Amino acid sequence: MTTENALARIRAQIMWNRLIAVVEEQAQTLIRTAFSASVREAGDLSAGVFDLDGRMLAQAITGTPGHVNSMAEAVGHFLARYPVAQMHEGDHYLTNDPWLGTGHLHDFTLVSPTFYKGRAVALFCSTVHVVDIGGRGFGPDARQVYEEGLCVPIMPLARAGEMNQDLLGIVRINVREPVQVEGDLFSLVACNDKGSTRLREMMAEFGIDDIGPLADHIVEHSLTATLEEIRKLPAGVYHNALTIDGYDHPIELKATLTISHDGIHVDFTGTSPVSGFGINVPMLYTTAYTSFGVKCLVAPTIPNNSGSLAPITVSAPEGSILNAPRPCAVAIRHVIGQLLPDVVFGCMHPALSNGAPAEGASALWVPQLRGGHGVSDSTAGGTDFNVLSFHSGGTGARPGKDGLSATAFPSGVRSVPVEITESIAPVIIWRKEYRTDSGGAGCMRGGLGQIMEIASAENAPFSVFAMFERIDHPARGRDGGLPGAAGTVSLTSGKPMRGKGQQTIPPGERLRLELPGGGGLGDPKEREREKVERDVRDGLVSPEAAEKVYGVKVT
């Protein structure tokens, strides 16, 4: 390689790193300006930059795989509706269509062109999860997507810098929290505008008028690097199946993973058909979390973009619960979609020299709470409120490491702090602590779940929109490791509640959530005595479990 070529590659790498910094600032702008706690506190968002062909070049580290990898496909739908030649400076295009955006109506996706020296040079895209979109609310009870809330087709939110007041008016009148939702739409605009500003500064600094050559460099090198990692694995066909709770009956997820010289393909033939409730998953969300699961094991250090995603392909029969067509209800598609990395890990475990992690709680536990008019048959309501918070069980044990407790994987979102929830809604969270003995026993222990107790601050009835998994089918251990504890939902009086669907907590009662733990890895009897003793001292494992399961008596 000549000195000139070496310098050109170094320059391209510096610009690539700078582009990643640009989109991270784009995401941080969204967090700082967002109105909804789900975005501001939990980071339930995505941000990225694309070339004019719709190829994702860089994504912000802040954000969820479901949003990011769905967004990678969504930009192509925007370009099909509004080609770049029709775009003008100051334009912003919006949708929350589940089959064109990120999988359900509660996510708004915004695409904005960036102009430099009078012509379009790139596209910025971002996504937020809003607190409400009307309809029945964020839960699985709807039977069709039409019941789940307002659907905005791909259309302009702004033209040449002028906001579409008609669209904003339609949104305001259809949602329970109009200030928060409208505020989040303005935050999306600020987010993409910040990305555009920083990109123009970067282009001026490096003296380039076109990012096309840089885009080609990013995509080609990422594709090559990912294929090199895939080709280190033993080619073959691998299978795995996972049974999960579902809504009214169990759901089977079946996968066939094929490793070849050209990439990895995951096929979900044999998976259960669509449900009559809102747990169905549009194909783009299935692709998002499946490809993320593959990438975690195969190429975790290669930046996520169109090049690194290209060798990973996904298919599922239309009409299966992982390829649900319109008008299926899809509000809580995350409950199944976020379990797909566990399915992938089970397929790839025999192909990896160190094996794969055990299964985890995986799907977020997201209690949406609503109070006031309509939450019960009683006319004595209390304050109207609608609040959403994110919480997590334990992750599966990893090769050489214990699982993480109360940690969101694969979504990566943060838990909403108790103080934030209590400050924006009349609720009290009386208890939030680790759930002793919930991590699956093993040579490497699974991560722990947590226990929460929630009540009305006004002694009024309130509703919970339950969307909880791993209650009937806990996370499985691997290689002799034991399963994590199953989740439970109840009132503190002892009355059991369903894991899914809208339910009312009466005055004077508390909602009790016991989040599931992750599975263990390896024989529990092989766990080091010092680790067991430390777990007992820390309250993660009880003395009784230490003796019974690990064979270690701790005084």
Image: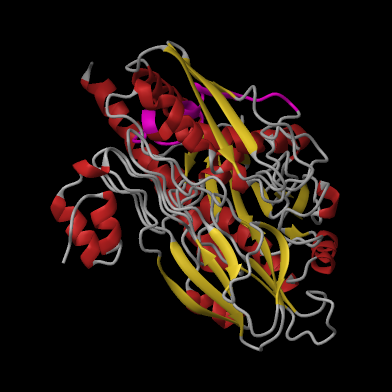
Is residue 228 shown left or right of residue 304? left
Q: Is residue 58 magenta?
A: no
Q: Is residue 515 visible?
A: yes
Is residue 547 shown left or right of residue 55? left
In the depicted view, which residue is nearer to us: 417 or 428?
Answer: 428
Q: Is residue 123 visible?
A: no
Quarter of the image containing the N terminus? top left
Snapshot colouring: secondary structure
Q: Residue at x 82, y 75 (%)?
A: 374
In the depicted view, which residue is nearer to us: 531 or 386?
Answer: 531
Q: Is residue 308 magenta?
A: yes
Counting from the top left corner in percent of width and height, residue 78 is at 71, 38
What is the quadrant of residue 76 in the picture?
top right
Counting from the top left corner in percent of width and height, residue 27 is at 50, 55
Is residue 340 shown left or right of residue 377? left
Q: Residue at x 49, y 53 (%)?
A: 486
Is residue 551 shown left or right of residue 21? left
Query: With respect to residue 533, does 473 lie above or below?
Result: above
Report the label total: 0
Counting from the top left corner in percent of width and height, residue 440 is at 36, 49
In the depicted view, which residue is nearer to us: 219 or 1?
Answer: 219
Counting from the top left corner in percent of width and height, residue 224 is at 39, 20
What is the quadrant of residue 444 in the picture?
top left
Quarter of the image containing the C terminus? bottom left
Q: Look at the image and give the residue range highlighted in magenta.
A: 297-318
Q: Residue at x 35, y 14 (%)?
A: 234
